[in-house]
Image (cartoon, rainbow, N blue to C red):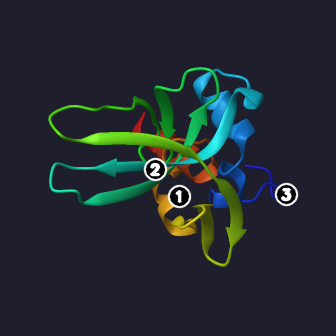
């Protein structure tokens, strides 16, 4: 390993960009918008999750922390709705908000979700040891 190369960890700021997710899922960055998924179960309990919404296909979204494309599902009294939201970097993470709805993803959660999915020097050396 070159001495100038550093063993830098994956950082949330590298991940939380539309371009990152567009590359990851093979779509154009301008086809995505930041959003909140509002899930309501049969007991009327609500859950809010940060996501990227597809502008043309209103039935799909990118689940940021689960790193997958998912459909909005409405079955058996459970409903999911995607709402366009503003996206702001804040201390310790990222806030997604729309009117009175607000959800937060911490830097630690993002880094934990993606640490083994992106190339870094440490992951490369660990893989080399396993061969």
Secondary structure, mark 3, is loop
The secondary structure type at the circle numbered 1 is helix
38 over 7 or under it: above or below: above
Q: Position of residue 115 (x, y in %)?
A: 52, 52
Which is closer to the viewer, label 3 or label 1? 1
Q: Residue furthest right?
A: 4
Q: Give how far across and how far down residue 26 sits, in percent.
A: 63, 21
Disc 2 residue crowd, few under 14, some 14–19, many 20+, Cα 10 Å:
some
Residue 82, how many percent across, how many down?
49, 41
| Among the two numbered marks 1 and 2 on one chain, the one whose residue lies closer to the N terminus | 2
The answer to which quarter of the image holds residue 47 is bottom left
For the residues labelled 1 and 2, the Cα–Cα distance comes to 6 Å
Q: CA distance from mark 3 to mark 1?
A: 27 Å
Query: Which residue extends farthest bottom?
Result: 91
Write the residue at 31% across / 31% down: 73
Q: Name the residue beneath numbered marker 2.
A: 65
Q: Mark 1: few, some, or many residues within 10 Å (few <14, many ≥20)?
A: many
Residue at 61% across / 76% down in the picture? 92
Q: Residue at x 21, y 31 (%)?
A: 75
Q: Which residue matches tag 1?
A: 110
Q: Residue 114 location in percent, x, y?
A: 51, 49
- The residue indicated by pointer 3 is 4
Image position of 106 with respect to 16: above or below: below
Asked if residue 8 shows in the view, the reply is no
> Which quarter of the figure has residue 21?
top right
Q: Which of the two marks, 2 or 3, is nearer to us in this view? A: 2
Q: Residue at x 71, y 66 (%)?
A: 89
Mark 3 or mark 1: which comes first in sequence? 3
Query: What SS does tag 2 mark?
Result: loop
Task: Give the distance between the C-alpha atoms of the residues marked 2 and 3, in whole angstroms.
Answer: 32 Å
On screen, residue 11 versus residue 124, left or right, reads: right
């Amino acid at each position: 390993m070159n001495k100038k190369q550093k063993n830098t960890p994956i950082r949330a700021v590298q991940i939380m960009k539309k371009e990152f997710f567009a590359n990851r899922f093979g779509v154009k960055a301008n086809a995505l918008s930041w959003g909140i998924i509002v899930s309501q179960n049969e007991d009327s309990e609500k859950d809010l999750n940060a996501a990227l919404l597809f502008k043309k296909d209103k039935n799909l979204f990118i689940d940021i922390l689960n790193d997958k494309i998912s459909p909005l599902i409405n079955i058996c009294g459970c409903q999911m709705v995607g709402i366009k939201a503003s996206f702001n970097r804040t201390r310790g993470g990222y806030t997604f908000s729309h009117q009175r709805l607000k959800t937060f993803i911490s830097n630690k959660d993002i880094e934990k979700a993606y640490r083994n999915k992106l190339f870094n020097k440490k992951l490369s050396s660990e893989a080399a040891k396993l061969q």
